[in-house]
């Protein structure tokens, strides 16, 4: 079990508060590591717990094993809360990882032929993002009145090319499917794309717009909303210097939220 801040304070000076934040390896843990020195100056000892999937971080947070997590966007959090009777809340947006479409066979999304196979992960909160990319490319339309942040592939109104969306794959496997030349196009989250050595900006055939509502957030339990150490963490992550660093470090593969 990971020690929460309140339990680990005794190991540090009386003026220091320790918080443990769960995060995906790329880019979340990297961004957290970037603000560690600044937080240390402000009396916050930031410990980072890296998770390799999208399942465990919210379980760990809800169970009190960590003080906050940083890996998800709001639609994902809302769906998790609904499915698990959770009450985790958003403490602040930090960045956007634009989801992108990759293809070894075609140079433009509009070049996909009839009955082309599009491989998508099983992460249902991302389906609206995928649908938006294909809608913006003029390849599909969405049923009227559908909230795109909760949309799925059954909400496609028209699909003239009869594109086949297959969505049963683990998110972390998507880069390998692309490298193995599977499908006509593969949709990959930026964090897994970067981990897999891919450049979402230069190598993709289509990429999510920066106006997307899927910005990644710091999530906490409701009883921690007045936690001063967490407030300092969010402030450091949202600071102009950190946002500028994100823009420079990831060259468009990760976009600042501010």
Image (cartoon, grey):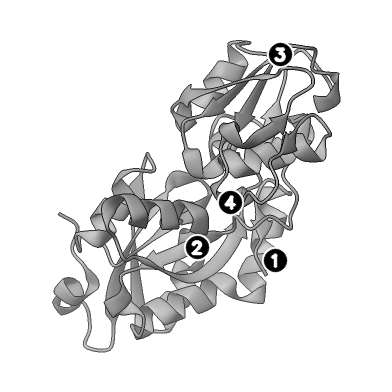
Marker disc for residue 244: 1
Q: Is residue 21 left or right of residue 115?
A: left
Circle 3/circle 1 CB separation < 8 Å:
no
**Distance of label 3 from label 4 (alpha carbons):** 25 Å
In this view, the mark in front (1 or 2) = 2
Whether residue 99 is visible here, answered yes or no, is: no
The residue beneath circle 2 is 217
**Distance of label 2 from label 4 (alpha carbons):** 16 Å
Q: Quadrant of residue 21?
A: bottom left
Residue 62 on image: x %, y %? 25, 60
Point 20% across, 64% down: residue = 64
CA neighbours of label 3 inside 10 A, class few (<14), some (14 to 19), many (20+): some
Instruction: Note whether 38 is above or below 83 in the view shown.
Output: below
**Mark 1 or mark 2, which has the lower sequence index?**
2
**Mark 3 or mark 4, which has the lower sequence index?**
3
Point 74% across, 55% down: residue = 210
Farthest residue in the front direction?
144
The residue beneath circle 4 is 149
CA neighbours of label 4 inside 10 A, class few (<14), some (14 to 19), many (20+): many
In this view, the mark in front (2 or 3) = 3
**Distance of label 1 from label 2 (alpha carbons):** 17 Å
Farthest residue in the bottom direction?
15
Q: Quadrant of residue 215?
A: bottom right
The residue beneath circle 3 is 116
In this view, the mark in front (2 or 4) = 4
């Amino acid at each position: 079990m990971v020690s929460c801040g309140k339990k680990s304070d005794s190991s540090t000076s009386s003026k220091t508060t320790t918080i443990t934040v769960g995060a995906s390896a790329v880019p979340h843990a990297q961004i957290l590591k970037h603000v560690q020195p600044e937080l240390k100056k402000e009396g916050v000892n930031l410990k980072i717990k890296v998770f390799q999937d999208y399942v465990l971080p919210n379980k760990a947070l809800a169970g009190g094993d960590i003080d906050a997590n940083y890996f998800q966007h709001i639609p994902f959090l809302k769906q998790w809360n609904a499915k698990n009777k959770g009450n985790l809340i958003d403490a602040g947006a930090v960045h956007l990882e634009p989801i992108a479409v990759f293809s070894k066979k075609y140079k433009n999304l509009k070049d996909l032929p009839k009955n082309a196979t599009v491989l998508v992960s099983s992460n249902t909160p991302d389906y609206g993002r995928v649908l938006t990319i294909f809608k913006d490319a003029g390849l599909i339309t969405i049923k009227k009145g559908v909230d795109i942040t909760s949309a799925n592939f059954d909400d496609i109104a028209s699909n003239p090319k009869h594109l086949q969306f297959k969505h049963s794959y683990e998110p972390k496997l998507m880069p390998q499917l692309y490298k193995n030349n599977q499908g006509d196009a593969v949709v990959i989250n930026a964090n897994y794309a970067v981990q897999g050595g891919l450049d979402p900006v230069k190598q993709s055939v289509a990429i999510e717009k920066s106006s997307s509502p899927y910005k990644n957030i710091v999530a906490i339990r409701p009883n921690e909303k007045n936690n001063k150490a967490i407030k300092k963490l969010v402030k450091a992550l949202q600071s102009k210097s950190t946002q500028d660093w994100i823009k420079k470090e990831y060259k468009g593969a990760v976009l600042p939220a501010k």
